[in-house]
Image: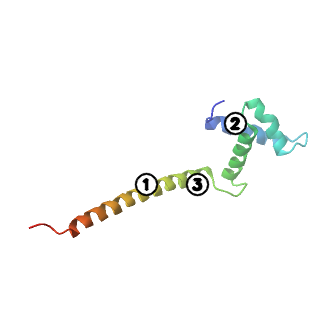
């Protein structure tokens, strides 16, 4: 089982669940539909449930961070960590060179 599924596969899986919920001829709950659909697609129930949840957030049906917002947050966190590392390096270099300037020079 792959650890990363293509987005097109996820979209089709979510569409299958949503179509089945809209048809709702048997009165099944959302979890029951996901539980029946996941084995047919050879994915975990929890994985499919998360895909459906995220699709609802992205569509604006539920509150939460959209996929694009989550990607931007991850990018900004990486950039922030990189800037903190660079800042620490500059502080260390600054302290080193300041100590060199404070040393008395032999004449």
Instruction: Pick whichever of labels 3 and 1 is earlier in the sequence.
Output: 3
Nearest to viewer (mark 2 / mark 1):
1
Element assignment for label 3? helix
Residue at image mark 3? 69
Q: Nearer the viewer, residue 53 or 47?
A: 47
Q: Which residue is mark 2?
A: 12
The Cα atoms of the two marked residues, 3 and 2, are separated by: 22 Å
Write the residue at 62% across / 35% down. Answer: 3
Marks 2 and 3: in contact by CB < 8 Å?
no
Point out which mark residue 106 bears: none
Residue 82 showing in the rendered view: yes
Residue nearest the viewer, comparing 22 with 95: 95
Q: Quadrant of the C terminus?
A: bottom left
Q: Which residue is at a point 70% across and 58% down the rendered structure image? A: 63
Give residue 85's quadrant in the image. Answer: bottom left
- The answer to which quarter of the image holds residue 13 is top right
**Label 1 Cα neighbours within 10 Å, binned few <14 / some 14-19 / many ≥20:** few
Residue farthest to the right, as pictured: 26
Looking at the rendered image, the disc whose residue lies closer to the viewer, 3 or 2, is 3
């Amino acid at each position: 089982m792959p650890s990363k599924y293509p987005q097109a596969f996820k979209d089709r899986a979510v569409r299958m669940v949503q179509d089945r919920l809209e048809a709702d001829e048997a009165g099944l709950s959302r979890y029951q539909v996901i539980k029946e659909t996941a084995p047919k697609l050879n994915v975990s129930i929890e994985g499919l449930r998360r895909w459906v949840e995220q699709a609802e957030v992205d569509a604006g049906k539920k509150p939460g961070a959209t996929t694009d917002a989550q990607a931007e947050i991850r990018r900004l966190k990486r950039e922030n960590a990189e800037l903190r590392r660079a800042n620490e390096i500059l502080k260390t270099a600054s302290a080193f060179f300041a100590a060199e300037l404070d040393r008395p020079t032999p004449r």
